[in-house]
Amino acid sequence: MSVSSLRFDPNRHLWLVYPIAFVAVLIANGALVYFALSSWPGLAYDNAFERGRKYNQVLREEDRESRLGWQLEARYEAATARSGVLIVRAVDRAGRPLVDLGVAAALIRPVGGGVADRAVELRAEAPGVYAATIDVPLPGQWEARLTAIDAAGERVHEAYRFVVR
């Protein structure tokens, strides 16, 4: 055996590089597809497509609410580790309390994918002040999507984010 026959030839195994690289890309793409399909979908609303199609209607509704002049101010006061009180103050444009409203809150965990979402009705505690005791199953950031409606059917929507530790 001569020295020239034992010399390393870089081209002899070059044909193996392409199938190995192809298999590596397939494995990486398969892992990405798996994690994309098995994790949170990223939707903020269940009907995001319809909401987008009706965006002009959403803008008209926001304009109507703005002209109405109602303001909802919310706060969360923790009582224990996973429970507390959601308090909403409702006033009109002049700062007068709004009485006899029906106030509801949809409690949504923005990163939860709808698993722990719940709805609560708030009760009148004082003129223009509505409250409800809420228990949340998981710590983290929550969003209260508030809806206030009066006897004439006028309504406003507001969102309030809070953290449960």
Image: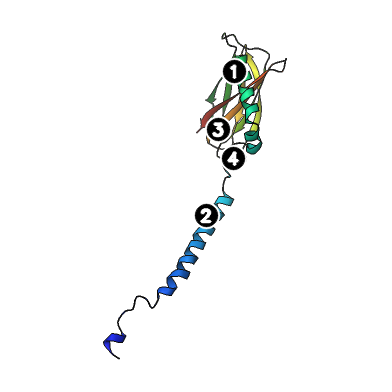
Which of discs 4 and 3 lies nearer the camera? The answer is: 4
Which residue is disc 4 drawn over?
43
Q: Tell me the amino acid under the disc marked 3.
A: Trp
- Quadrant where the N terminus lies? bottom left
Which of discs 1 and 4 lies nearer the camera? The answer is: 1
In the image, 124 versus 22, the foreground residue is 22
Which residue is disc 1 drawn over?
66
Which residue is disc 3 drawn over?
142
The quarter of the picture where residue 6 lies is bottom left
- Measuring from the top left, give residue 117's x and y in whole percent: 62, 36
Between marks 4 and 2, how big is the CA–CA gap? 19 Å
The quarter of the picture where residue 80 lies is top right
In the image, 122 versus 40, the foreground residue is 40
- Callout 1 touching callout 4 (CB < 8 Å): no
In the picture, the disc for residue 32 is 2
Q: Secondary structure at mark 4?
A: loop
The quarter of the picture where residue 110 lies is top right
Residue plotted at (52% across, 29% down) = 162
How packed mark 4 is, by other alpha carbons closer than 10 Å (few <14, some 14-19, many 20 or more), is few
Q: Tell me the amino acid under the disc marked 2.
A: Leu
Q: Tell me the amino acid under the disc marked 4.
A: Leu
Residue 48 visible in the snapshot = yes
Q: Earlier in the sequence, mark 2 or mark 3?
A: 2
In the image, 41 versus 113, the foreground residue is 41
Between marks 2 and 1, how big is the CA–CA gap? 44 Å
